[in-house]
Each structure stands twice: as structure tokens, then as C-alpha cells.
Amino acid sequence: MPYPSQVNRDDIIAQAWQLIEADGADNLSLNKLAAALGVKAPSLYRHVANKAALLQAVNENTSLRLIEALQTAAAQTSGSPSEQVAALLHAYRHFAHEHPHSYLLAFTNTDEALRPDAALLEQMVLPIQTLMTAVSGPEQSLAALRGAMALVHGFVLLELHGQLRRGGDLAVDFATAVQAYLRGWEAVP
Amino acid sequence: MPYPSQVNRDDIIAQAWQLIEADGADNLSLNKLAAALGVKAPSLYRHVANKAALLQAVNENTSLRLIEALQTAAAQTSGSPSEQVAALLHAYRHFAHEHPHSYLLAFTNTDEALRPDAALLEQMVLPIQTLMTAVSGPEQSLAALRGAMALVHGFVLLELHGQLRRGGDLAVDFATAVQAYLRGWEAVP
DNA sequence: ACATTAAAACTAATTATATTAGTCTTAATG
DNA sequence: CATTAAGACTAATATAATTAGTTTTAATGT
């Protein structure tokens, strides 16, 4: 192996993840990343096609972690289907709060190439979908799932982007909104 | 006045808005913008402090247009408070679909300095807030408003970011989700 | 008519970043 | 001990934002 320092693809992605967690994707340059790994920027191209591919790998990492968090939460939840959905939506929000920069990079990206792929997204929402179907019935299950995801995702983004600045307890308001939404599905005419 | 071409701050912001509408903020460079105005990039600094200030002005423009769209919709709506809220949420979504790039730039921004200010945001949601209060009662009106905004904003972003790719009619699913949410508030125990 | 001023353009330079081309180092292999 | 190839390096290029310093020209005052 050449030269003192040595780096592999996984190291690079792990380090990128950490820098993004700390400072956000906007503040990640390949120079900084390389420096953190004790290497110069061009060396990274030995392991990663380009910055987009790197960020895509970071995003896949984020998706996998979120999937894991939701599966864990699903395994630990009990109660009525509605209560369990609520618990998963809270777990989802909790993840976003724990990893705001990674969450934003993974799930609010204009760049087609950086988006998590469809299969991963499906796997991600599967636990919620299953329970939601029990709440809404199978006919409307996709609409009900989409509404649920919109509600959490939207709430989280409004929080992360600083658009809920009028006070009050955001955790309580989130719980209240989720309950209203689920109650609406239970009260189908 | 000096030199053949001449440009003022409003021209610059209007042109930036148009380029962003067409191609997204990621594809706007000061070079392109200046060229579209028949001028060189450094000339822009005579009228705008820097790129951030320019984008901030563009975002304010977007907010004002959205405010106008919602006020117009509010003026034309009739029916029960729930029906009127639903109509406003549809108008909101419609605006986002008509102006996806501008919407994303204005409302999904990590950069503190680019965010629409609090007063403008309040003005924006005021028509929705007023009606929502009639649905939820005044006690819970802030939570109810936040949930409604989260639902639309989240739904729109999932759409714009290509995360609802499993078919079905998204307009119908949106309407369905909104109805469920509002029904939930009407069915408060 | 002419000199002055000031707004607003310009060119040239600086910094940062991603990326490519071409070179050097060294561990492993024959 | 020679060769090879992975993986580092330096140097160079292109694009962007931004700053410094210069030039143009309309308007103003004498």
C-alpha cells in the first residue's frame, strides 16, 4: 500500500456523514473532508466517482438508519393501530430532530440523482403503512399513508427551517395534529 | 447615465425570479443573471449587496405572491369553515405547483438569512388561521393551524421532491388527507 | 460652452471549489 | 530483486462569488 495515510470508501462516507451531521451538507467541501481523513481532495476520487455519488451514499446511510429506527420503534410499540401509528410518527420526528442535517440532505433534495431510491423509500414507510391500513381500511390505505407522511415530514421541515416561531410546545402541537389526523380516519362517514 | 445598458434593483430581482422559475435556484449564477440583463456580473453589486440578499428579495417576492393568492382564494370561497379551509389548502398547493422552484427556494432553506421573516409568514397563514380557528376552537387554534400547514407543506414537498411515485391520483389523495385531518378536528371528543 | 461630479458600467484580480491529468511511492507478487 | 498496480500526490482547469480599481456618460453648476 502506498503512502502513509490510507483511506477506503467506507471511511470516506462515514467521515462525510459525521461532518454533515455536525455542520450540514452546505459546509462540506471535498477539501475539508479529505483533510479530516489526512489526505488531499483528489485522492477521494480513487474511491468515489464524484461529490454527488458521495452524497448519495451518505443519503443511503441516512435512509437505512431511519428504516432501522422505525423498525425498532414498531417492534416496541403496542396499543391500538392508531396509537401505534402515532408512536411511529413520533419516532420518525425524533429521528429527524436527532439528525437534522442528514435528514434534510436525504429528503429535501432537488437533485434527482441524490434521492433515495423508490425501494428504500417503500421499505422505510412499510411499518407505518401496515398499521395505517388497519386504521383507514385497504381501499384508502395509500392516501392515508401519504397524508400521514406529509404531516410528519411537513411538520419536521417547518421546525427545521425555523418556520414555527410563534411559541407553544411544538411536541404537544405535533401530537395534537397527529391525533386529529388519525381521528379523522377513524371517523370515516 | 453611464454606458448603453442600464439596470435597476427591481429589474435584477424580476429577472432572477424568472430564471429561477425556469431553471431553479441551483442553476442561477450571477454571470447568467447579468448576461440576461445585458450586463456583467460585478455590475449587479451596485444594486444588490450580494447573492444572498438577491435571493432574499426573490423570496420576499414569492411570499407576497403566495399571500395574494391565498387572500384571493379566501375572498372567493364559501361554505362551511372546513370547506373553506380545504379550499385554501388547495390554493396553497396549487401555488406551489405553479411555482415549484420559487416555492422551494423560499420555504425550504437552510440558510437563516434567506428565510421569509416572521411577519410575512404570519400574514401568509392568516386567512387559513382565521378559518381554522372556527373549526378547532380558539384554544387549539395554533396547533390546528400548524398541523394544517404541515400537511400541505409536507405533501407538496413530497410531490416536488419526487417521493410519491407509487401511482394513484395525487390530487385526490391530497384532498382525502385534508378531509381526514379536518374531520378529525370536527370530531374532537 | 465647459468643467465637475457621481452613478453605474467595465476589466482584472482573488478566493474557493470541484474536477482532471499526470506523476510518485510502496506493498505485494513473480 | 524487478515489476506491477493501488493509491497517494502535485499541478492545472473551469466555474463562481466577490472585491478593487478604472472608465464612461448623463446631469449639474459656472
Image (cartoon, coloured by chain):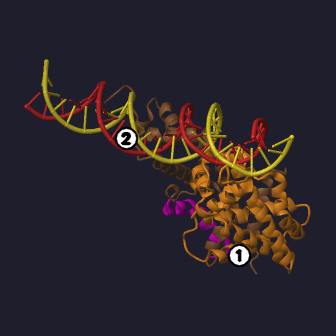
Chain colours: A orange, B brown, C yellow, D red
Q: Nearer the viewer, residue A50 or A169?
A: A50
Amino acid beneath label 2: Arg
Label 1 CA crowd tier, 10 Å (few <14, some 14–19, many 20+)? some
Secondary structure mostly seen in the magenta stretch? helix
Q: Residue at x 85, y 60 (%)?
A: A123
Q: Are marks 2 and 1 on the same chain?
A: no
Amino acid beneath label 1: Ala
Position in image of residue B53 (x %, y %):
45, 49
Label 2 sits on residue:
B46
- Residue A20's quadrant in the figure? bottom right
Q: Quadrant of the C terminus of chain B?
A: bottom right
Residue B114 in view of the camera: yes
Q: Residue at x 79, y 60 (%)?
A: A146
Pointer 2 chain: B
Left/right placement of residue B71 relative to residue A189 reads left
Position in image of residue B176 (x %, y %):
79, 60
User: Which stretch is magenta?
Assistant: B117-137
Q: Secondary structure at mark 1?
A: helix
Q: Is residue A117 above or below residue A189?
A: above
Left/right placement of residue B162 relative to residue D28 reads right
Position in image of residue C26 (x %, y %):
69, 49
Q: Is residue B188 above or below residue B61?
A: below
- Taking the magenta stretch, the answer to whether it contains residue B7 is no
Q: In the rendering, which numbered label is found on residue A40? A: none
Pointer 1 chain: A
Question: Count of labels shown?
Answer: 2
Position in image of residue A156 (x %, y %):
66, 65
Q: Nearer the viewer, residue A156 or A113?
A: A113
Q: Nearer the viewer, residue A63 or B119?
A: A63
Q: Residue at x 46, y 29 (%)?
A: B38
Q: In the rendering, which numbered label is found on residue A175? A: 1
